């Protein structure tokens, strides 16, 4: 990122004190507007810069916990299983996804974020 944590904190302070709008703070501090909105909504997901997510970190942790339980019970977990599980969860939470979405990009980013916790075979999905 081209901004520091201090810059982000200063931007958030000025927004909260109504000295700057979110758009003005983004320009002034050179911070992506999405980063500011995410921090304001407490929706921090520890993504790599530019990464796209649908679920919050806590919501993803529930999916990770479920996958680990399936594996402990010796139930096979494939990428398509994870995508199906996540899609059902996202729809239940009324996340903005299309019923026909394949979620392949989401799955790829999800596995990068949780690579240390999860090991899933690389079968077709």
Image (cartoon, grey):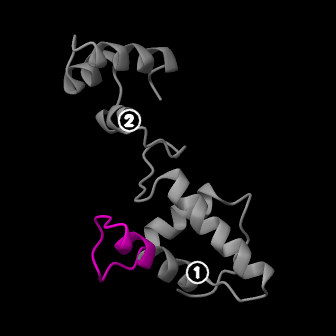
Q: Which residue is mark 1?
A: 79
Q: Residue furthest front?
A: 92
- Image disc number at residue 100: none
Quadrant hosting residue 115: bottom right
Identified at 29% across, 81% down, the residue is 99
Residue 61 vs residue 79, the one in the foreground: 61
Q: Which residue is mark 2?
A: 35
**Image spot of residue 23 (x, y percent):** 20, 26
State which region is magenta: 88-103
User: SS class of the residue under badge 2?
Assistant: helix
Q: Please identify the dominant SS of the magenta region.
A: loop
**Image spot of residue 64 (x, y percent):** 63, 66
Label 1 – label 2 distance at C-alpha: 29 Å
Left or right of 65? Residue 59 is left
Quadrant hosting residue 42: top left
Identified at 72% across, 89% down, the residue is 75
**Image spot of residue 1 (x, y percent):** 47, 29
**Image spot of residue 12 (x, y percent):** 36, 20
Residue 100 magenta: yes
Residue 91 vs residue 82, the one in the foreground: 91
């Amino acid at each position: 990122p081209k901004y520091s944590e201090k810059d982000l904190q200063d931007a958030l302070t000025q927004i909260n004190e109504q000295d700057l709008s979110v758009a003005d703070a983004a320009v002034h501090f050179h911070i992506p507007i999405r980063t500011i909105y995410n921090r304001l909504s407490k929706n921090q997901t520890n993504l790599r810069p530019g990464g796209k997510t649908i679920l919050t970190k806590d919501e993803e942790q529930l999916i990770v916990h479920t996958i680990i339980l399936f594996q402990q019970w010796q139930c096979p977990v494939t990428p398509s299983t994870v995508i199906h599980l996540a899609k059902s969860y996202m729809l239940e939470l009324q996340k903005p996804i299309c019923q026909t979405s394949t979620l392949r990009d989401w799955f790829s980013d999800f596995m990068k974020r949780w690579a240390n916790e999860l090991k899933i075979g690389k079968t077709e999905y």
